[in-house]
Each structure stands twice: as structure tokens, then as C-alpha cells.
Image (spheres, helix red, strand yellow):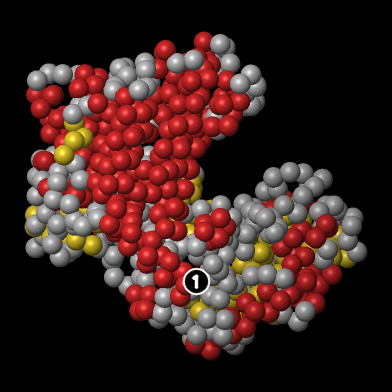
Amino acid sequence: MPPSTRVFWTIPLDDAPAARAGAKAANLARAARHDLPVLPGFVIPVRPGDGTGDLRDAWARLSAGGERPLVVRSSSTQEDGAVSSMAGRFVSVLDVRGWERFQTAVDEVIASASAPGTMAVLVQPQLDAVAGGVMFGADPVDGRTDRVIVSAVPGGPHALVGGEIDGTRYALTRRGRVVGEHGGGPLTRSQLRALARLAARTASVFGGPQDVEFAFDGDGRLWLLQSRPVTALAPVPPRRAPLLGPGPVAETLPDPLSPLEEDLWLMPLDRGLGEALATAGAVSRRALRRRPTVVSVGGRAAADLRRLGAAPGGRPWLRLLNPVPAVRRLAVAWQVGRLRAGFPEIAARTTARVDAELAAVPGLAELTDKEMVAALRWTRATLVPLHGLEALAGSLVTAEKSATAAAQGLAALTGARARGLDDARIVAANPAVLALTPPSIGPTCLPPTRWGTATPGSGLGAREGLRLRIRWVQELGARLAWEAGMRLTSDDALPRPEMVRVLRFDELVAAFEGGSLPAGLERGAAPPRTAPLPAVFRLAGGRVVAEAPPPGDGARPAGGGRGSGPVHAGPGSPPAGSVLVVRTLAPSLAAELPALAGLVAETGSPLSHLAILARELGVPTVVGLRGALDRFPPGTEIVVDGDTGAVEAAA
């Protein structure tokens, strides 16, 4: 039937249920019933015949016989819901004049429906607005519910919501006070206060923060044009959520970890650090049982920064209060005092024992299934005290003048490659080169190595010796896991050996003890693809919420003098003379150091492996510089002062 002869029935706007009138009209009806400033209007329902008034009569009354322009808007049952707003998905027609144009506009709105029988049509007078815009009753970006965010333009809000122009942004307190700079704009302070009151009233009526379209008319009156839930509100971390970051643990495990890698290496790291913290009296064992120190976030290692003393913006004066009970302080002081005196001997005995046990490992193909599982268990158990002692070495051992494992490895790698040796022969001859790479389960042509009997690794200080043994034990675990994957593949338990990475450790053990593998392994066979973690963040419902940095950039000098050059960031080897800017200090960067004019990292410690090696090589190094990758794009000429921590654009 042509539009001119079709009959629609209408519903008054103040009596519009969502099932017949769509969510947009129903929300305005609810607002009107609570005396919020809503323009009059009517609704053409989803199903013709559900209304009570004749369409032409309703149009004539609202438009004053065609003298007043109207707005014909969508009001779908699929939009403005609690989960999805469907913002901008459907048609609205402005400045509709005359009966014929009105009927055409109605047809256009109905035709924009994504499914038949879901579109109602909302009709209201066209407002001659002097200013308008959108308002969020909470900050949708950071989730703060104590802020009201307004974006406003001269005239009505349609150009703003359509993305045609940018508005002036205002951040308000709940009482309408402007926070920060806003650069003038079309709204007065009294109008902003009126908007804050409207935000509070709509939140009260609808039970939560609302996404509101508004307009001020020529008389200064505020009108509510639309109200829907804020559906994309950022999660807010719990009040006492721990402050996390890749920090120093990313130097040990910089790459995304598979489930089996987490169980082999992350769990021992957490337990080892926990033992060190408890021994030093920094954290009670009860707190360690309640919450881990090291966690996996999307497959990436992150640590509780406050526990490790690496949180930015701390309050050193609070340490003077020392809330640890007096008896516990005395016990810890006595224990640490004894440990400090005996630490060199403890470290030497531990490394000697680990060397002997590593040297006793036969070729992996010679191991029975039972022996292979026992060896994997040994690697996990051995890493716990190694990580604990390595962490304690930082505070119990005076600065060591000896070479680092990374420096030995780099020298060995450079010399062996100059002689034309391949990587397998290099590692077999000098396993110290493993300090230059992070652990990873994967195919390898490297032969079994009697690491404990190798001369390389001797002459190191206590901490560096422990670090090297950690890497050796991790490497043994990686090779054992790959051998397990090969055996499960040959038994047709796995289609491909790399899928062993997807198993948890207990699942792998169960498979070799006669159990079945879990279903759906194929879906998780690929390594996890997750974005690098921010330097400091909290978790809200499993989602990473970056922490706003405190005053200052967090930069810490790591030595090496002063240098300058163009920034290199991202994949690929940096050109000679460039300054490498990275997120974390991965061991694999060691081979790049000799050619660098400087090194800058967003996280990390001056005591990390790579920072120590950079100092030895005279590479100016600064760590902990928050936002370095954004501040210094590739190609920017910068000056790095490793003695003061200053990083500046070259003049």
C-alpha cells in the first residue's frame, strides 16, 4: 500500500512500552514520567494497529498543521539496551516538513531495521538548539564513576554524534565543577552544573550511569533527547587490586608463555621469589598463600611490583614506620644476618650440586618415560631454590666485580661465529651462551650438553653463577618437554609435537602414566598472541587496566656514560650507532649491544642481566622510562645519559 494511503496507529510518548515502542522511546517515556525534561511526541509502534490514535491527527497536532518541523527517529527493540546500544545503526531524519515528507521519512526509518518487526518510529518536534551534545554519567575510557564527561557543540548534537565535527570536551565532578583544561566551548558553567544534575537524575531513574544526548534551546532550557545505558564502561579494578607489571620478571621470561611453559618456569619463579621475600621479612607467608607474587596475564609474566619494591611513586617515609611486628623483625634480622655471612658458601654448594646433577643427565632419548617425568619434576623443584637464592643475592651480596654470564656468553658467541661454528656446536662447547636467550619449548638440533662439567660459567660471582644455572635448568626442562611431545606424537596421542606446549604439567604427567589427553588441544596449539603488558597495571575482571603514571617519568640510570643517536624500535637488528628503545630488557638483545650508542627500556632494573652487560660494554643505559616508545618514535635523535637517567631529544 502506498505511504499516502497507509494508516498507522500511534502511542503517546509518555505511555510507550519497550515491546511496542522500542527502547529509545520507552526510555524517554520513563524519563518523562519522572519529570525529566523530555520533549512531547508520539510513537508509531512496531506492529501497526497496536496504537490508539490516527497517524495524521497525531502529526497535525505535533507539527501545528505542518508549521513546525519534526524529527523522525528510529526506536528499535534492538538498540539502547543494557549490553549493546547499536548507536548510529539506524536512520533518523531531521527537519521534516509537510505531510508527504513526513510519510517518506517514516518509511526510511522503518526500512533501516535490521530485522522485520523490530522498528518503531519516534516523532518529536525539531528543537532550535543553541548548544547540544552528548554526556556520559561516568568516564567510559577509565571507568571512573566520579566523573561526568561532556562533549558539546554549537547547535544540535546531530553533527557531533554523526562524527562530522569534534566537540569541546569537559570533564566534570558530580557537582559540575570542571576538572582540568577544556578550552572554552559553547557551554557556560551554569549549563555544565545543570548537566551534572541531569546526569545524577538519569542515573537515579535508570539505575546506573547513562549515555545522554542533550540540547539547550534559545531560552536556555535543557532538554533530554535520548538516554541509554553506558554499555562500554571500562572496568574498574578492585580497590586493593595489586599493582602489577612485567618489571624484573620480564627479563627472565620476556616472551608469551604456553600453558606448559607457565607450569615449568613461572610457578617455580613465583615460589622462589616468595621464599626470598619471606626469608627477608618483606612479606608474611600468610600473604604469600593468599596471593601469588608472579602471575600469568594473557600468557605473559607479571609480578606484584609493591612486593618486589619496584612500584613507581612509593612512599619511602612509610618504611620508617615498619609495621612488621617487633618479634618478627628480630627473628628476620637474626636470620638474615646469619644468611649474609654464610651466603657465598650456600650459593657455591647449590651451584655445585646443580652442576653435578645436570652432568649426570644422559642423552634424553635414553631416558625411559618414567625417568623423563622424574627429570621434569626435578627441573621444577630445582628452580625454586635457585630463584630464591638469586633474589636474595641482590641484597645479601656486595657488588661483584666479576664478569657476568651474559658477557661470557656474548664473547663466546662472537668468537665461535668468527670461526664459522654453527649454533648447535657453539652451545655444546660453551653453554654460557644460553644466558643470551630466553627459554622456549620447541624443536632443537642442539645435542645433550653436560652443562655442569663445562668450563664456561666458572669465574662468575655468586649471583651470576645462580643466574646461569637457572637458565641451564630451564633449558633442560624445555628439551625434556619437546622430547615428551615427540614421544606422544609417535604414539599417536598428539598429532604434532609442538602441541605439547598446550598441556598443563599435570596433564602431561597423566598422559605418561596411562591417562588420556584433554579434548580440544588443536585449538590452542599456536603460541599465545597477546599485546605486551603496560609497565604498571591492575586487573579488573581479568582485563588489564593500565595505571596512570605518578609524577615523573620513572627513569633510572643504569650506567654506561653518555651517548646519542637515532632511535630504533620494533623488529629487526638496530643499525650501528643507533639508540635501541624497548619495552623490556630481553636477554636476546645482548648480541645487539656492542653496536649500540644507547639503550632505553620502559621497565627493568639497573641490576638486570642486560643492564649489567650494557655497562660492561660502555653502552649508556636508562631503565624504567615510562612511555619511552611513544615519546621517542623511530628515527628521533636522542641523547641518553646512563649516569643521570636523562633521556632527551637532541638539540
For image coordinates 37% across by 67% down, the residue present is 333
Q: x, y percentage for residue 131? A: 52, 77
For image coordinates 19% across by 56% down, the residue present is 399
Judge whether residue 209 can be spotted in this image. Answer: yes
Left or right placement of residue 57 versus residue 578 in this view: right
Of 613 and 92, nearer the camera is 613
Specify the quadrant of the image occupied by residue 279. bottom left
For image coordinates 52% across by 72% down, the residue present is 149
Report the amino acid beneath label 1: Ser
In the rendered view, tell whether residue 405 sits above or below residue 441. Answer: below
Judge whether residue 578 can be spotted in this image. Answer: no
In the rendered view, tell whether residue 407 sits above or below residue 425. Answer: below
Of 632 and 2, nearer the camera is 632
Q: x, y percentage for residue 427? A: 23, 24
Specify the quadrant of the image occupied by residue 595. top left
Residue designated by label 1: 151
The quadrant of the image that shows the C terminus is bottom left
Q: x, y percentage for residue 533? A: 41, 50
In the rendered view, tell whether residue 87 sits above or below residue 63. Answer: above
